[in-house]
Amino acid sequence: MLKVLFLCHGNICRSPAAEVVFNDEAKKRALAGKIIASSAALSDEEEGNGIYPPMKSLLSASGYKDLSHRARLVTEADLESFDLIVLMDSENLYLYKNRFGDKASDKVRLLLSFTKDGGEIDDPWYTRDFKRALYEIQTGVYALVDKLTCQIER
């Protein structure tokens, strides 16, 4: 099984949304059991908290079901057990490198690097643009699942 870990600052908006979208997409494509995602935070300030209410409401309104997530801090063990570590923006990359140095750096990618245009997903905690963040997360996740599907089928 291929395991993907999504990381963002607090693990209450972007990374749990990516986890939910990814696992939903894997199920739709009959890839459950072949690929799976989880998520974690690069900071401990939201540890134990659920998905931030505006993002949770948007995910629910978009038809996503399992929203029981609780924020947790990424660990060194995660770096070893996950095959791919996906970040949302350059600030996440800075926090990752500050904490872990070059550990597992060969596994680290930005989510939108899987898309044609690349870029970063701004933190909706600050921008308040949850719809845009979810759209960009979906775009990145769909491109990532496409890539992984091609790898699995080889």
Image (cartoon, rainbow, N blue to C red):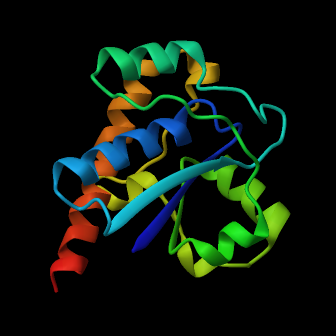
**Which is nearer the eye, 31 or 148?**
31
Q: Relative to residue 34, is residue 83 drawn left or right?
A: right
Could you tell whether 39 is left or right of 152 in the image?
A: right
Q: Quadrant of residue 136?
A: top left
Q: Nearer the viewer, residue 58 or 48?
A: 48
Q: Looking at the rendering, which quadrant does residue 71 occupy?
A: top right
List x then y, in percent, for residue 6.
54, 53
Considering the image in quadrants, where does the N terminus appear? bottom left
Q: Is residue 133 above or below residue 118?
A: above
Q: Quadrant of the C terminus?
A: bottom left
Q: Residue at (38%, 25%) from the top-left corner?
A: 132
Q: Is residue 107 above or below residue 92?
A: below
What is the x, y in percent for residue 40? 65, 49
Q: Residue at x 25, y 68 (%)?
A: 147
Q: Is residue 60 left or right of residue 74?
A: left
Residue drawn at x 67%, y 67% as measured from the top left: 78
Spot occupied by residue 102 in the image (x, y as percentages of width and height): 74, 78
Above or below, 39 relative to 32: above
